Amino acid sequence: MPGQVEGGIAQALGATLWEQVRLDGRGAVETAAFRQYHLPAFADVPRTEVHFVETADAMGPLGAKSMSESPFNPVAPALANALRDATGLRFTELPLTRDRIWLRLREG
């Protein structure tokens, strides 16, 4: 089960930092192949440490819960809030690419 959490974090990092579907003026997808945008590789994902809390919840076998989606949700807000703490600027659009961050810093 820790692997599901780690996979969810890797997927969330990809969506937060790199992955972007680009559309042309007609609404057609320009990034139609995986090689046209960055998907996180092993080297892109920081080492994670997964801890589980014991539960007495009767739902699921032995209190088990779905875990592949749960770690996805907090990643983008956590990174955007870290950027706000570091820069004083709020970032509300994903992905949080270096180019977007740089332009936002220049705009102030």
Image (tube, rainbow, N blue to C red):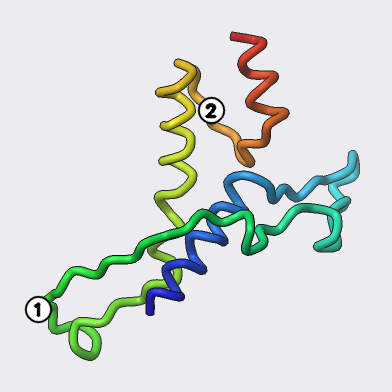
Relative image position of residue 42 (x, y in whole percent): 62, 63
Secondary structure of the residue carrying numbered label 2: loop
Q: Residue furthest bottom?
A: 61
Q: Residue at x 18, y 69 (%)?
A: 53
Among the two numbered marks 2 and 1 on one chain, the one whose residue lies closer to the N terminus:
1
Vertical comparison of 53 with 88: above or below: below
Q: Which element type, helix, strand or loop, lies under badge 1?
A: loop
Q: Position of residue 79 (x, y in %)?
A: 47, 39
Q: Is residue 98 left or right of residue 89?
A: right
User: Which residue matches tag 2?
Assistant: 91
**Which quadrant is home to the C terminus?**
top right
Foreground residue, 28 or 36?
Answer: 36
**Residue at horizontal 61%, vertical 52%?**
15
Q: Could you tell me which quadrant the N terminus lies in?
A: bottom left
Q: Position of residue 82 (x, y in %)?
A: 43, 31
| Callout 1 amino acid | Ala
Q: Residue at x 63, y 58 (%)?
A: 43
- The residue closer to the viewer here, 41 or 103, is 41
